Image (tube, helix red, strand yellow):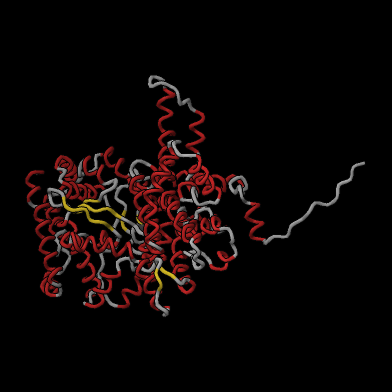
Amino acid sequence: MWVRGRDVEWAIPEPLAQTLDEANWYDREDGVLGKASTEIMRKWKQWVLMNPFNVLRYNLNNMSGDLDIALAYDPRILKHLNEARKDLWKDYRNKGSAQLREELDEAVRLGVLDSGFAIQDIPESAESLRRLLDPKADWRSPKFWKSLAPQGWRKTRELTALRENLIRLAAYRHLLEEIESGRKDVYGASRKDEIDQITDPRQKAAKLARELIGDYGDVSHAGQYLRRHLIPFWSWVEINAPRYARLLRNVAHEEQLMGKRVGAFAGKRLAGRAALMAGMFALVSLWNRIFWPEEEEELGDFERQQMHLILGRTSDGAIQSIRMQGAFSDVLSWMALEDFGEDVAELITDKKSFSDQAQEMIQAPINKLYQGALPLTKSLMEVTTGRSTYPQVFEPRPVRDRWQHAAQAFSLGKVYGWAAGKPSRGWGNALSSWLVRSTDPGEAAYFQTLSLVRDWNRKHHGADQGSFTPSKRSNALYSYKQALRFGDFDAAERFRQQYFDLGGSPQGMNTSIRLSEPLGQLHKQDRRRFTLSLSPKERERLRRAEAWHRKVYAQPRRKAG
C-alpha cells in the first residue's frame, strides 16, 4: 500500500496567518447581513465618488493629496511626473515597448501600481455587468444603450486608477534611483527596521513608494472592518496622518534631505522637513495672497478654512476658486488647525479666547469621526428626526425638505431641486460647480457678519438661535428669499404666491426680511456697541453685507412682486 507521511509545517506569526486566511475577505463575511452591508457600502462609495457630479472634484482632491505628501518628502519626485504620464498613457493604449511593459508589470507585482483607492475600495460590479452585455451592439439595439452605463463606469474607474498610478510610478522611480545611487538613509514614510531588512533595491523602493503615497491594500484588520461597515473612507484616515509622523521620525535617521547635507543639529533637519510638509499648503496660500489678496479677504469663512486655489473673478464679480483638500491640511483639520493663521490672528486680537480654541480642538476629531460614519444610516436618522448634523454635529440644523436631504446622501440634491422646481442659480452655474466654486463677495460678507452677530449674542446674552421645526408656510417664505438670493425671479413669484396661499401676510414677509438684515438679530441698544467692537476689515465687511442685503431683498422684490 501507499503511505504518505506528515506534510511540512511552518510556524508563522498569528497576524500573518489571519491575513492569509482572510485574503478573500468578502467570501468569508459572516452571514447575509454582513455581505449585504459590505456590498451596499462599496456600491455607495462607487456612486458618490464616480458619479458625473463628483468625479472631477474627487480626482482633483485626491491628486492634490498625493502631490502634498510627495512634496513633503522630496520635491524631486515631481521631476519624474511627465515621463511617468507618457509611459502610463502609452501602456493604457497598448503602444508601449516590451521593456516598458516589463517594468510596469513588475511595479504591479510589487504593489506600487494599482494600490490606490480606486482599485482597493471601489467595487468591481461595473466590470461584471459589462461582460453580460453585448459591446458590439449597434445604436439601434436596446443592448447598446444598456451597455453605455457600465462601460462609462469602467472607463471612469480605469482613468481614475491611471491618474492614481501617476505619482506612484514617479515616486517609485525616484526612490529606486536614490537607492541605486548608493544612499543608505532612504526611509521615506516607512518604518526603519522594516526597510533595513530588505536587500533587493526594487522591493525596497516599491515598499517606500507604496507607504509614502498611501497603500490602501495595507489596512489593518480593524480598519478593513470599519471601511466595509461603519466608516467608508476609513482607509484614508488610517493611512494619512501616520505618514507625516513617520516622516518626522525618520529625519533622525537620514543624513541627507533633498540631496543636500543638512546641519548637525536635529532641530534644523526637523525644521526643513516641517517646511516641506507645509510646502503645498504654503504655496497655495502664497498664490492666493500674492495674486488675489482682495479675493482672499472677501471669501467666506467656510471657503477660507478649506485649502483652496483662487482663479479670479467672473464678469459679475463672483470669486472663482477650486477646493484642494491637501493631505497635510486634512491632518490639521483633526485638530481644528486647518486655518491656523486665522486662528492665531483671532487669538491675538481677542476675537477668540484660548478656551474657545481648546473647545474647537476637542470637538474637531469627534465631529470628523461622526461625519464620516454610517452615511446612509445617519441620513435616514436625519430625515426621520428632521435635524441635520452637517457640517457640525454640535450645531444641528432643521431639515426643510426631507426628500431633498435624502437625495443629497447620493449626490443628487441638485437633481432633486431641479425636478422639484426649487430656486436655482441656473444650469451654467450648476455645471461649473462640479469643479469650480463660485462665491459672491457680498453674500460671503453677509454670512460672515451673521456669524459675528451670533457670537456677540452668545457672549453677551447667552442667546442662540436654537432649534425650530419649519412649517410649509415658513418653507415657502424661505424658498422665496432664497430665490431672490439666486436671482431666480420666476421661482420667487411662485413661492411668494405659495406663501400667501398658506396664510402668510405682507407684514409677516416684511418682518422676516427685516430680521434677516445683517444686524437684524441684535437688540437696538447693542448695535452701536457691536459696530464699535469690529475691526476696520470687519466694518468694511458689514458695509458690503448691508449693500448686498439691500440689493437682494429690496430692489428685486419690486420685480418679483
The answer to whether any part of residue 267 appears in the image is: yes
User: Residue 162 location in percent, x, y?
Assistant: 42, 44
Percent position of residue 194, x then y: 57, 65
Q: On screen, 143 above or below 383?
A: above
Instruction: Say which quarter of the image contains residue 297.
Output: bottom left
Return the residue nearer the eye: 153 or 462.
153
Q: Nearer the viewer, residue 84 or 271?
A: 84
Relative height, residue 121 to residue 395 (above, below): above
**Left or right: where does residue 204 sit relative to residue 363?**
right
Q: Give how far across and how far down residue 74 sits, in percent.
A: 40, 63
- The answer to whether 157 is drawn above or below residue 144 in the figure is below
Please state which of residues 252 and 551 is positioned toward the viewer in this rendering.
Answer: 252
Residue furthest to the front in view is 181
Of the 4 image quadrants, the one containing the N terminus is: top right
Left or right, 445 with reference to 48: left
* Quarter of image, res 548: bottom left
Residue at the far right in the pictured view: 1
In the rendered image, the residue lying farthest to the top is 140
Residue 373 visible in the current orientation: no
